[in-house]
Image (spheres, rainbow, N blue to C red):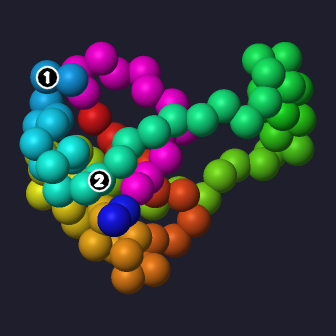
Amino acid sequence: MSSFSCLSFGNEKLTSRCRAGKLFWDGYHVHSSLVASKAQHDDMLEFAARHNIEPTTEVFKFEGSETIEGIFSKLDSGKVRYRAVLEF
């Protein structure tokens, strides 16, 4: 069984474009997590901006359930580098 974390969601189109069957019946789990308070996030972002710190990411453009399957395939094989970002 595979899972991925969703660090931020700013696009409400997910519910209309993402088919629940592929995500849930195939055993995928989507979840989100906050690791600190809003004030701590603000402090971290300010620190990162002040020191020019940027995340290293691998971006996947959402093009349907095939995109999700491809991401999980890469996750399961250990081939995702750094943070995987799903772009809508």
- Residue 16 numbered tag: 1
- The percent coordinates of residue 34 (x first, y second) are 66, 31
- Tell me where residue 76 sits by quadrant: bottom left
**At 25% across and 56% down in the image, what residue appears?**
27
- The percent coordinates of residue 62 (x first, y second) are 22, 45
Of the residues under marks 1 and 2, which one precedes in the sequence?
1
**At 60% across and 59% down in the image, what residue appears?**
56
Quadrant in which the C terminus appears: top left
The reply to whether the magenta stretch includes residue 4 is yes
Q: Which residues are magenta?
A: 3-14
Q: Nearer the viewer, mark 1 or mark 2?
A: 2
Judge from the rendering whether residue 10 lies leftward or rightward of residue 25; answer left or right.
Answer: right
Judge from the rendering whether residue 38 lies leftward or rightward of residue 79; answer left or right.
Answer: right
Binning the other alpha carbons within 10 Å of mark 1 as few (below 14), some (14 to 19) or many (20 upward) gives few
Give the labeled residue for mark 2: 28
**At 88% across and 44% down in the image, what residue appears?**
51
Question: Does dot 1 land on a helix, a strand or a loop?
Answer: helix
- Tell me where residue 3 sits by quadrant: bottom left
Binning the other alpha carbons within 10 Å of mark 2 as few (below 14), some (14 to 19) or many (20 upward) gives some
Question: Does dot 2 land on a helix, a strand or a loop?
Answer: loop
* Residue type beneath disc 2: Tyr
Quadrant in which the N terminus appears: bottom left
Cα distance, mark 1 to mark 2? 18 Å
**At 82% across and 40% down in the image, what residue appears?**
48
* Residue type beneath disc 1: Ser
The reply to whether the magenta stretch includes residue 72 is no
- The percent coordinates of residue 23 (x first, y second) are 21, 46
